[in-house]
């Protein structure tokens, strides 16, 4: 296996990724050996590389938006056979017996494991995936188009559900990167009025081209009160801003795995009149299956910038500097 691992966490501009080359073992029981066709570059990968998330293993290979072909399947991995196209996502393992797993909330399992954090991910030419947590993918689709769906799409889908957007409601989206630009398309397809709040002029143009009703800087606020909002930007200072924009009974869902500190909230201005503030934690496999079915139904299209695998440090630096419009994808 050839790829990139996180050496010493540091700002992306200082290139914290280091080249790695390792023997990759044969797939064990329930595992798939996958040849990577594409891997999205997620903001979670950036948090890991920059140290916002503590590495769980030395030189872990990031990447959890993996599209690839099965090379070999271990015993008990009967869902897939060599040649099948599969997707590997963030969630890669749960205990299956704790109260959260038994309640269908495996995203909260205390013993959960994650691709590109607890085990090597897709910033490489080959990787191992647990078959029970892999998704079947269309064999003829562009792999670079599929990759962002496997985390950006799935977590955006869960965040949208957590926001409890009513039918044909008014949705605010704060930040407009990989996850947000997919979530906006789902909301528009379902008849919502979408208002995008982001500092990037290029992202505002993309939002309008995808059907958003307005696109402004967050400091301007949306043109009307919101029934629901999703915060994708990892900026805690936007929490009170988004809460202030909610109508009575509205809900703000915070979609990121990492957020800078949230300023103090004023109860009457930010939370009174039954405004809700919710976090979003990982996803369940049902979330993934439901989202991929939705993406196929509405013909979801990701806006992608492709990078060769050798340019992974540049892709990460571009993401950190907001130079990526839509999603960055590595193509080995």
Image (cartoon, rainbow, N blue to C red):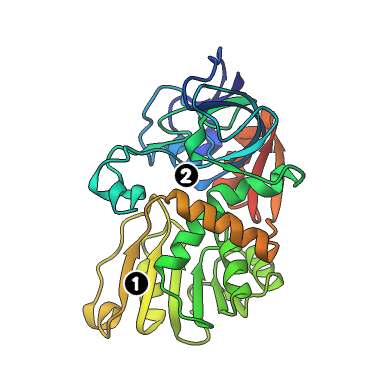
Residue 275 lies in what quarter of the image? bottom left
Whole-percent x, y for residue 141 in the image: 75, 47
Does residue 232 show up? no
Count residues near mark 1 (Cα–Cα under 10 Å), then give few for <14, some for 14-19, many for 20+: some
Residue 47 lies in what quarter of the image? top left
Residue at label 1? Answer: 240
Does residue 189 show up? yes
Q: Nearer the viewer, residue 115 or 132?
A: 132
Q: Secondary structure at mark 2?
A: helix
Please identify the quadrant where the C terminus is shown.
top right
User: Where is 92 relative to 291, above or below?
Assistant: above
Closer to the observer: label 1 or label 2? 2
Whole-percent x, y for residue 174 in the image: 49, 67
Whole-percent x, y for residue 311 in the image: 67, 32
Count residues near mark 2 (Cα–Cα under 10 Å), then give few for <14, some for 14-19, many for 20+: many
The residue located at (66%, 27%) in the rendering is 82
User: Where is 76 relative to 322, above or below?
Assistant: above
Q: Nearer the viewer, residue 227 or 314?
A: 227
Q: Earlier in the sequence, mark 1 or mark 2?
A: 2
Q: Secondary structure at mark 1?
A: helix
Marks 1 and 2, how far apart at CA? 23 Å
Q: Nearer the viewer, residue 173 or 157?
A: 157
User: Where is 203 relative to 219, above or below?
Assistant: above
Please identify the quadrant where the N terminus is shown.
top right
The residue located at (24%, 76%) in the rendering is 266
Residue 18 lies in what quarter of the image? top right
Q: Is residue 180 left or right of residue 165?
A: right
Whole-percent x, y for residue 126 in the image: 62, 24
Residue at label 2? Answer: 44
């Amino acid at each position: 296996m050839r790829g990139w691992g996180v050496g010493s966490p540091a700002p992306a501009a200082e290139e914290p990724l280091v080249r790695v080359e390792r023997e990759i073992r044969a797939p064990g029981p329930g595992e798939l050996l996958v040849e990577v066709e594409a891997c999205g570059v997620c903001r979670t990968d950036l948090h890991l590389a920059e140290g916002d998330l503590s590495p769980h293993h030395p030189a872990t290979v990031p990447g959890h938006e993996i599209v690839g072909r099965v090379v070999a399947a271990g015993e008990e991995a009967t869902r897939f056979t060599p040649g099948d196209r599969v997707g590997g996502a963030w969630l890669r393992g749960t205990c299956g017996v704790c109260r959260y797993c038994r309640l269908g909330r495996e995203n909260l399992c205390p013993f959960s494991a994650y691709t590109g954090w607890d085990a090597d991910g897709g910033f490489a030419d080959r990787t191992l995936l647990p078959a029970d947590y892999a998704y079947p993918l269309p064999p003829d689709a562009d792999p670079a188009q599929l990759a962002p769906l496997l985390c950006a799409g799935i977590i955006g889908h869960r965040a949208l559900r957590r926001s409890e957007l009513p039918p044909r409601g008014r949705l605010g989206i704060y930040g407009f990167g990989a996850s947000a630009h997919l979530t906006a398309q789902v909301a528009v397809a379902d008849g919502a009025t979408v208002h995008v709040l982001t500092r990037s002029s290029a992202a505002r143009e993309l939002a309008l081209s995808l059907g958003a009703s307005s696109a402004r800087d967050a400091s301007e606020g949306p043109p009307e009160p919101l029934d629901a909002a999703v915060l994708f930007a990892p900026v805690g200072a936007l929490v009170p801003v988004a809460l202030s924009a909610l109508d009575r009974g509205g809900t703000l869902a915070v979609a990121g795995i990492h957020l800078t500190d949230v300023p103090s909230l004023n109860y009457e201005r930010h939370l009174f009149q039954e405004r809700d503030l919710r976090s979003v934690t990982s996803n369940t496999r049902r979330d993934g299956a439901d989202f991929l079915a939705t993406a196929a139904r509405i013909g979801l299209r990701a806006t992608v910038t492709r990078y060769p695998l050798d340019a992974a440090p540049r892709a990460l630096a571009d993401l950190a500097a907001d130079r990526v419009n839509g999603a960055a994808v590595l193509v080995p």
